[in-house]
Amino acid sequence: MVIGPARDRWISAWPPTPCLLCAGAGAGAIAILLRVIPGALRGRTHAVTPAASVAGLALPAFPATQALLFATAALAPAYVIRWHVGRYPSTLLEAAIVLTVGVFLVESALSRETPAWRSPLTLPAVLFLAASALAVLAAPSRSAALGIYRAYMLEPAALALVIASAVRTYRQGLVLITGFFVGASVLAIANADLVIRLILHHKLDVRGPAPSVIYNSPNSVALYLVPLLAVAGGVVLYSTSRAGRVVAAVFVLIAAPASVLTFSRGGWATLAAVMVALAASHRRRWWLLAALAVIAALVVIAVPDVPHRALLLLRSGDGNTSGDRIRLWSMTLTLLSHHPIFGTGLSGFETIMTPLWKGDATWILYPHNLALDLWVETGLLGLLSFAWLFGAAVVISWIGWRRGEAGWSAIHLGVLIALFAILVHGAIDNPYFKNDLSVEFWALAALTWAGRRWGSPAPGSG
């Protein structure tokens, strides 16, 4: 691994991170908006009534909200751009969410429409928010806990309500997904470029984490990219929109190699699980599985650092993190035996574990397991309500995939496999408690419900 001045020189070859993120997202947004959004303006389903028309062109409901949803999705990785207003910390992502929710409320008032808050997700979502509020009271630092509650629970849930209410056609769903693809592509290209240059100059040490750009760790990159790859794969295989398939295919070509180049072994396992699940869903599954096996073999041959990194798990010493994970899980379970109901409160785990943990302090931000993360941070009610919310999203996605409208079914499958990816990676890492990851989860859950709510086949349509 490149450290110190050498690593700084490699990273300094990039433009400043905010400029890179905004310029890349802006350029991608312009290109894709010109291709995809006109279709979204024309796209209708039986359940949707246009809110207005201009020059004979039917406009979708909530037109300004639609545009802001695209921008907010593209800016999900921009939570790294931070500032303070007095003592109040904020991020570019938070500003985008607040603006989107505000504009949605204005458009709802003007159109006299009530937000679509009734759904199978509502009760578990409310319980999860209530459990998280109790976790603020149980936290050692309530100011830190309030910040987490706002960024990881309230704002993503509010954005999910907007998505469930405003995204009413399959093409509008594609536009939202495209927004996520744009921001994720900037992240993927930045990280892949850095790692490739390190490999070419023999500067990469696979015994430690690969260096990363924009995010603090390569694991964070894989955690964000792979669920979106699941959605893109569903669109590529099953979309009824030619433009949607092209956009999704381009994203796969960018993000899949970038996920491999994170050198995150959890990311590799999750990416493999996603690709196998996508292939298994298709009628030509054996051909697709064979193609995946060939691609995997080519990657191993072309990038020898990949098998070297994977085999480190079979040896003791640098590069084998399994012992640290098991030790952390054991300490977490001991901690939970003393706090089984309320856990440690939001942000409490790190505070309590800091004097007890011997080793790299970045390990103790969370327990590195989704169930333990939720239990220790939000208590038993938080764990159970999130499991209900997650399970409801799985059921909605499965029904949508099997019985839904032809266009939406591709998104339903993609979300279903994305949720599977969250579970797989969540077995050994933290797939929720980050600004981008929480927004990603809530947005996908809301999108799959929007497909069921607005995209169900019309009566008598066969």
Image (cartoon, helix red, strand yellow):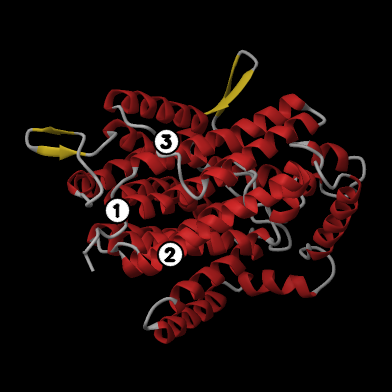
Is 88 above or below relative to 140? above
On the rendered structure, is 181 left or right of 258?
left
Residue type highlighted by circle 3: Cys
Tell me the tag on residue 124. Answer: none
Q: Nearer the viewer, mark 2 or mark 1?
A: 2
Label located before the other in sequence (2 or 1): 1
Q: Assess whether mark 3 and mark 2 are in contact (beta carbons under 8 angstroms).
A: no
Instruction: Residue 156: give x, y in percent of width and height.
Output: 53, 38
How far across and down, in percent of the image, does residue 348 sit? 80, 37
Q: Which residue is mark 2?
A: 399
Above or below, 257 against 361 in this view is below
- Of mark 2 and mark 3, the one earlier in the sequence is 3
- Neighbour class for label 3 at 10 Å: few (<14), some, many (≥20)? some
Using the numbered discs, state the Cα–Cα distance from disc 3 to disc 1 in whole angstroms.
27 Å
Q: Which residue is mark 1?
A: 170
Instruction: Single out the mark in the foreground, 2 or 3.
Output: 2
- 103 horizontally vs 139: left or right: left
Q: Nearer the viewer, residue 92 or 416?
A: 416
Q: Position of residue 282 (x, y in %)?
A: 39, 78
* Label 1 secondary element: helix
Horizontal placement of 137 versus 267: left or right? right
**Outermost residue, front direction?**
460
Residue at 84% in and 36% down: 351
At mark 2, the secondary structure is helix
The amino acid type of the residue labelled 2 equals Ile
Whole-Å distance between the Cαs marked 2 and 1? 16 Å
| Residue that lies at the very extreme toward the top in this rendered image | 86
**Which residue corresponds to the image point at 57% horizontal and 47% vertical from the top-left?**
437
Three-letter code for the amino acid on which mark 1 is drawn: Tyr
The mark lying in front, picked from 3 and 1, is 1
